[in-house]
Image (spheres, helix red, strand yellow):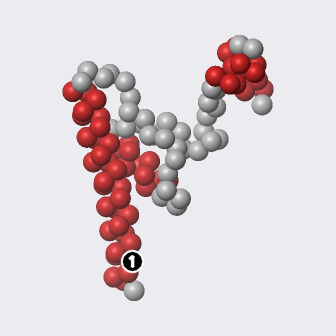
Amino acid sequence: MLLLGERVAINVLARCSGIATLTQSMVTAARAHGYKGVIVGTRKTTPGFRLVEKYGLLVGGGNAQRMDLSSMVMLKDNHVASAGSITAAVQRAQSA
């Protein structure tokens, strides 16, 4: 039973490490080409692995943006269009 738990722990660490390594590679490549912005991960993660995958992203030099839909509001063009202006869309989001 102990070895089964060890295998799970190793797999979780390997997944996190792989994400961190890939993120660091992307950040390095972006910087090499003069990109000064932030490399941001999506909120789409493997079910049950959100914290592990977001942590790997942060360790690799990326930005997790938001943990879930409740972390912040995202206004898209269709929200602005339906509200009539960006100001109105922001006001609607703040009052919700």
Say which quarter of the image contains residue 17.
bottom left
Instruction: Tell which of 42 and 59 is nearer to you.
Output: 42
Say which quarter of the image contains residue 5.
bottom left
Where residue 72 sits: x, y (%)? Answer: 61, 34
Name the residue at 78% across, 26% down. Answer: 95
Name the residue at 75% across, 21% down. Answer: 82
Where residue 66 sits: x, y (%)? Answer: 53, 39
- Left of 32 or right of it: where is 54? right
> Looking at the picture, does residue 95 appear above or below residue 9?
above
Residue 44 seen anywhere in this rendered image of the structure: yes
> How many numbered marks have been drawn onto this rendered protein structure?
1
Q: Which residue is identified by label 1?
A: 5
Residue furthest bottom in the image? 1
The three-letter amino acid code for the residue at tag 1 is: Gly
Name the residue at 44% across, 40% down. Answer: 41
> Looking at the picture, does residue 44 appear above or below residue 5?
above
Where residue 13 sits: x, y (%)? Answer: 34, 61
- Left of 22 or right of it: where is 12? right
Where does the C terminus fall, quadrant-wise?
Answer: top right
Say which quarter of the image contains residue 30.
top left
- Left of 95 or right of it: where is 18? left
> Looking at the picture, does residue 16 appear above or below residue 6?
above
User: How busy is the neighbourhood of tag 1: few (under 14 within 10 Å), some, or many (20 plus)?
Assistant: few
Where does the N terminus fall, quadrant-wise?
Answer: bottom left
Name the residue at 44% across, 48% down. Answer: 54
